[in-house]
Image: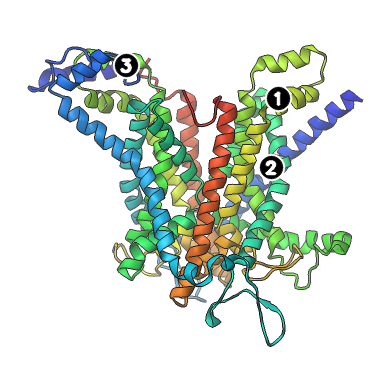
Amino acid sequence: MRTGTDGLATGLAVLSTVLVVAPLVAIFVYLIYKGASSLSFAFFTQLPKPEGELGGGMANAILGSAVLLGIASLIGVPVGISGGIYLAEFGRGTKLANAVRFTADVLNGVPSIVMGIAVYALIVYRQKHFSALSGGVALGIMMIPTVTRTTEEMLLMVPHAVREAALALGVPNWRSVLSITVKTASPGIITGCMLAFARVAGETAPLIFTALGNSNWSANLNEPIAALPLQIYTYAISPYDDLHRLAWAGALVLIVLIVAAVSLVRFVASRGVLKGAS
Amino acid sequence: MPEIRIAQPQVQTEPNAKNGQPGAGSGAAEVSAIRGFLLARGNSAIADRGFHGLMVVCALSIFAIVVLIATELVMRSHLAWSQFGFRFFFSVFVDPDNNKPMYWDPVNGHFSALPFVYGTLVSSFLALLIAVPLAIGLAVFLTEMCPRILRTPLAFITELLAAIPSVIYGLWALFVLVPLLREHVNPWLVKLLGWTGLFNDDTPTGLGFLSAGVILAIMILPIISSLTREVMNAVPGSQREAVLALGATRWEMIRMGVLRNARIGIVGAIILGLGRALGETMAVTMVIGNTPQIQRSLLASGSSMASVIANEYAEASGDLHLSALTEIGLALFIVTIIVNALARLLVWAVTRGAPAQVH
């Protein structure tokens, strides 16, 4: 009887694992199957065609995503890394650091669409027009908590001896932090930033009413701009088969970017971030 | 080693290198009185203070973001709040023409968030219903039963599942999951469980609460299972050995030795998954059908708080409409903040001792 229950429980655990892995495999297989057959050179070089016409690409959306992610990284990376440095180097164990860490975790769970509304109210509402800038700011704000937390975790792995050695040589504290501690942890910090980057690269919700989308070339920060996930969304809910094909191709490009980033993070983390330090 | 070699020339080549400052003590964690004294007197005192200040400002920006979101949302939703107050979330209008309830009619100025609150709750709880058993099963398998060779790839796969953008989940759901449910699952549900009234399919589009719930379940699974894994790993090995030594089978060991000890953390993980499901936007918007109505049937189309914002915000038909949508966003913000804070405290309670007080 007891062995029976044991076997049943094992079976259920295996079954649920299979049920979890199945949709993932299904998503990937379908994505590669649909995406690869629609992906072409034109996808990367051409503008979208007017509705109903065949062909065209998403070149403007790729450019737009690059612009948006550029703005986002300019905001999210420096602020996030500095916040992480504070948590790991200055605030260890203090009440303030615990509060910051907790708020960062909670902020991570705030829906991205809420971030979009806040940035709409902050920038779009005041400027009276949609803009690439507002989209970039929304994505940048979303990067900050993730980058802060990963930077902190990476810095905590740096052994104390490294800091002590630097300080014992008479290096000022700020210099020791920047050129010793942060430098030692830099592979980890960079991959953490890439992870945050990959996360916001796929964000759609905050862009709907900030960047808005654009069917022409545009890199102007004061105008609406196209973005890859946004374009995928618009094409997916459109009634045209040809646009659905483009949506699948776009999704494949996006997922390759993201899987690459995640694998890199795994690789660096498993290799040990701090080979040089020990 | 190379890092230290880098440090040395810097000290020598800089003419105003702060050599006058004798060794500055140990790591930042152990700020002794001597170190404080030296730091305050050294030439680098200003640079160090400035650097410290800058880092503090950046860390505080996280609070600033929360305050910013809150104030902007409150300011922009003021109009709807002063007009409707709390009734906004409960009121029902009745259409005089056909006596049907009417909730959301921006053109005629009827605003009630009731159908969206309903849609969000129904789809999220459906998602939890599907995801929680699977996630716990997966976590149990990965931590307690899995052969070592399989563990890393499986953990990687679940991590990937968490990294897929929601718009891609939506795309897949729209073109694969919805047709699948419509053709094969829904007719079967109607036949078997139609008598409950929960599965009536008058207009079989496949779009609706059930599709939204299923795709949400797939999306929140990795979060719940990875956190469950984390709290289960935090249960000491001696606990397992003790139960096994008393003659328990593996499942009894898991149930009594591991799950019972980790239950608070597991509840935390589930609540965190709930928080994710409540605010999930794109995938839900693409498959829920986007009709502001309350239907008993899970196969009927509906609308959620996030989906109505995504659909209508960019082309809102007036200040009151915009303000009402912002108020829905504010409600979503408050609820997710509370849910996430609660979940984090519960997970911390298990993995790090006392909640929020980490030492």
Q: Are marks 1 and 2 on the same chain?
A: no
The answer to whether any part of residue B313 appears in the image is no
Q: Which residue is mark 3?
A: A162
Query: How far apart, in angstroms, are the residues tagged by discs 2 and 3?
Result: 43 Å
Percent across and percent down for residue B263 are 68, 32
| Front residue of this view, candidates B256 and A191 | B256
Marked residue chain, label 1: B
Disc 1 marks which residue? B258
Instruction: Say few, some or many: other residues with alpha carbon within 10 Å of mark 1 (under 14 / 14 to 19 / 20 or more).
Output: many
Residues at circles 2 and 3 in contact by the CB criterion of under 8 Å: no
- Which of the two discs, 1 and 3, sits closer to the camera? 1
| Both marks 2 and 3 on one chain | yes
Q: Is residue B275 above or below residue A241?
A: above
Label 2 or label 3, whichever lies nearer to me, is: 3
Percent position of residue A216, x then y: 37, 69
In this rendering, which labeled residue sits more in front, label 1 or label 2?
1
Outermost left residue: B15
Q: Residues within 10 Å of mark 3 (few under 14, many from 20)?
A: many
Let me know if residue B182 appears in the view. Answer: yes
> Which subunit holds the residue at mark 3?
A
Residue A20's tag is: 2
Could you say where residue B212 lies in the image, as x and y percent from the top left? 66, 58
| Label 2 environment density (alpha carbons within 10 Å; few <14, some 14–19, many ≥20) | many
